[in-house]
Amino acid sequence: MIRALFISLALTSSGLVLSGCGFTPVHQSTANGSLLQDINVQVEKGDNVADNQAGFLLTQRLRDRMGDGGVAPRYRLEIEPDYSRRRLGITDQDVASRYDITVKAKYRLYDAKSGDQVARGDVSSISTFGAPIGPYGVITADNVGIEQASRETADKVIRDLARFFANQDG
């Protein structure tokens, strides 16, 4: 009984502390949350298939988290994805045992009406995986690595945009 009371009191006080410091969730329906929903995402074609795959996955994650921008979005977000894979541990047979997958994104945010650039940035994420034996295992692990790194990169773009819009209000 005392433990339940203590947990209830702790949750209530943490809510009061967070609301007192100005904490607001990114996806709420206030001004900043609606601005994230009012962005049309466009990805530039990459130089290779892996760049385009990373760009597709970035776009999917951004649209899942922010929406598709609606009919007449206020902003246009252009993203230039870049994929790279680096071999890490090498076995005595000169075969990689681990890989790092890096997905980078250069982004630019434009006002849709004026065409003026209002924000820009670079973000990246790394996913590391152990190389399974056999070529198909490496391909599958590479695909999973691209997905993970693309999701994290998209989340970092959203974080940067939320920070940008929060600073515009203050």
Image (spheres, grey):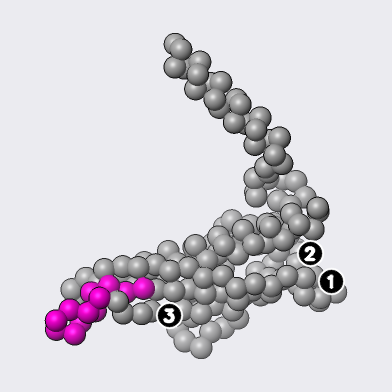
In this rendered view, identify the residue nearer to me: 17 or 153. Answer: 17
Name, please, the residue furthest toward the top. Answer: 1
Decide whether residue 38 is among the magenta residues.
no
Q: Earlier in the sequence, mark 3 or mark 1?
A: 3
Q: Position of residue 75 (x, y in %)?
A: 75, 67
Q: Earlier in the sequence, mark 2 or mark 1?
A: 2
Q: Nearer the viewer, residue 135 or 165?
A: 165
Left or right of 165? Residue 148 is left
Is there CB contact under 8 Å for labels 3 and 1? no
Q: Quadrant of residue 16?
A: top right
In the rendered structure, which disc, 3 or 2, sits on the residue that comes first in sequence? 2
Residue 147 visible: no
Which image quarter: residue 67? bottom right
Q: Secondary structure at mark 3?
A: strand
Image location (x, y in percent) of residue 53: 47, 76
To which quarter of the image does residue 49 belong?
Answer: bottom left
Instruction: Residue at 64% x, 62% y: name it.
Output: 160
Distance CA(mark 2)–CA(mark 1): 7 Å
The residue furthest bottom is 47
Q: Which residue is mark 2?
A: 74
The residues colored magenta run 89-100
Q: Which residue is mark 1?
A: 113
Q: In what element is the residue under mark 2?
A: loop
Measured Cα–Cα span from mark 3 to mark 2: 33 Å
* Neighbours of disc 1 within 10 Å: few (<14), some (14-19), many (20+): few
Q: Is residue 60 left or right of residue 107?
A: left
**Mark 2 vs 1: CB contact within 8 A:** yes
Amino acid marked by disc 3:
Ser
